[in-house]
Amino acid sequence: MSRVHTIIKGDTMYRISTTYYGTPNKWKDLVKANPQLDGSARIYVGQIITIPDEIEDITNPTKIKKIPESIENVSENAISILIDDRLFSFFTSYSMTFEIDTFDTFSFSAPFDDSLEIYREAFRPFAYKPASIYYGNELIFTGILLAPETSVQPDRKEISITGYSKPGILNDCMMPISSYPLEFNNQTLKQITSTVCKPYGIQYRFLLSPGNPFEKVSLEVDKNIFSFLSGLANQRGLIITNDARGKLVFWLSELDNPIGSFKEGELPFISCSPSFNYQSFYSHITGISSTTEEKSSAKYTYENKYLINRGIFRNYNFIAEDVSDSEIKKAVLSKVGYMFGDSVSYELRIHGHRNKEGDLFKKNTSITLYSPGAAIYRETEFLIKSFTLNRTTGGDTTTFSLVLPGSYTGEIPEVFPWEE
């Protein structure tokens, strides 16, 4: 038995495969089932194609042996998740968010067949299953499956699964009670990280120097590990995230050659919305080191010329704990960088998940954007703070959270996007 489908605007064989079979990976079989296409996936509005009721599913987890490391049989744009050495590629929609200064997350939706033991085992509540996600044959995520939740509707059964990268557990949990009191005297950030990551088996790497040792810091019994580490990292001018293999990463935002350029009114541009936090933008930011019996405090003030030149005075002071005189400037510039990141951001939405060169978007990279409707009156380079890959029946889209280039580094832009 077969059905027929009349092509409408926006249809692709990839999307039609997902609609009828719950997986995009059958699009090649659909092409074979329609000889009038002459082996091509090219279709046009009004064309009628045949939809077979059954096509052998090479991605059915009940038929897959242990997945080969190269994932050679997976199509270029397929999203697959590996759980218990079995590959699942049957998702009807997904959302994956990649962050520069916190941990990556994912959310998937799919049909649920409770008659299959492999489904029941893979998606048991509170099993905290290891999960790896591939885009085509590229590993993009290694983490933990958190919340498989099923839903029974009159005409279908569905499952929603969410998860986060391996180091995400550091944001949930604290150190074993036997570890306390937990004090670190004259230890570097790298040494401290080694201690607090050990109970959870989290690996880490530093892309920059961990900086000077901390004279004396302590992890309170009721404070989670990530909050403690990120506070220390900020004092050393670093931010924390994860890599695709689930390692904790300490790095700094960097601008290289932009990986994409987008303009309002030109594809793949969809929309752009600015967000301004006027209460967190300051003309002066002063950091003051803490005073001890051995030394007096030092201070450093950053001046935001954009406000000062307009006669606007807005002052902010903070105490920089356990910061030496030589590091007080770095601590202030780190605070200034976060001011830029918190004060000015843009949400850009585009079609697709790849740039013009065919590469997947990456975090800690930049793009250029021109959007007068969003008060971006000149082509401006923005840092990608985070981006979310979405796939629904409406197609593939990417949503970027963009911040000023000086975010996280304290380097104020020479000209802001809204200046003409």
Image (cartoon, helix red, strand yellow):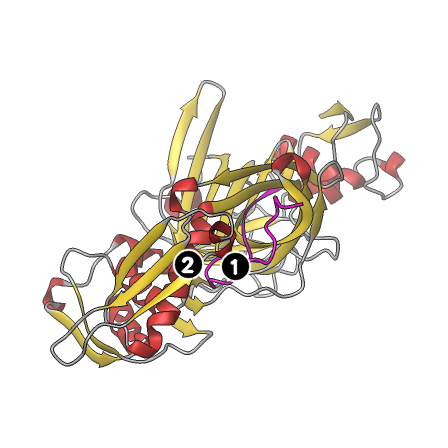
- Identify the residue position indicated by label 2 in the image: 336
Please identify the residue farthest to the top as the structure is shown: 154
Helix, strand or loop: magenta stretch: loop
| Of 380 and 392, the residue lying toward us | 380
Q: Is residue 203 left or right of residue 99?
A: left
Of residue 387 and residue 279, the one placed in the foreground of this image is 279
In the rendered image, which residue does mark 1 sit on?
412
Query: Residue 154, how many percent across, how many down?
Result: 45, 18
Determine whether the residue tagged by mark 1 lies in a helix, strand or loop: loop
Marks 2 and 1: in contact by CB < 8 Å?
yes
Quadrant where the image shows the N terminus: top right
Q: Of the residues shown, which amino acid type is indicated by label 2?
A: Val
Q: Quadrant of residue 260?
A: bottom right
Magenta-drawn stretch contains 404: yes
Q: Residue furthest front?
A: 311
Q: Position of residue 217 (x, y in %)?
A: 19, 71
Q: Secondary structure at mark 2?
A: helix
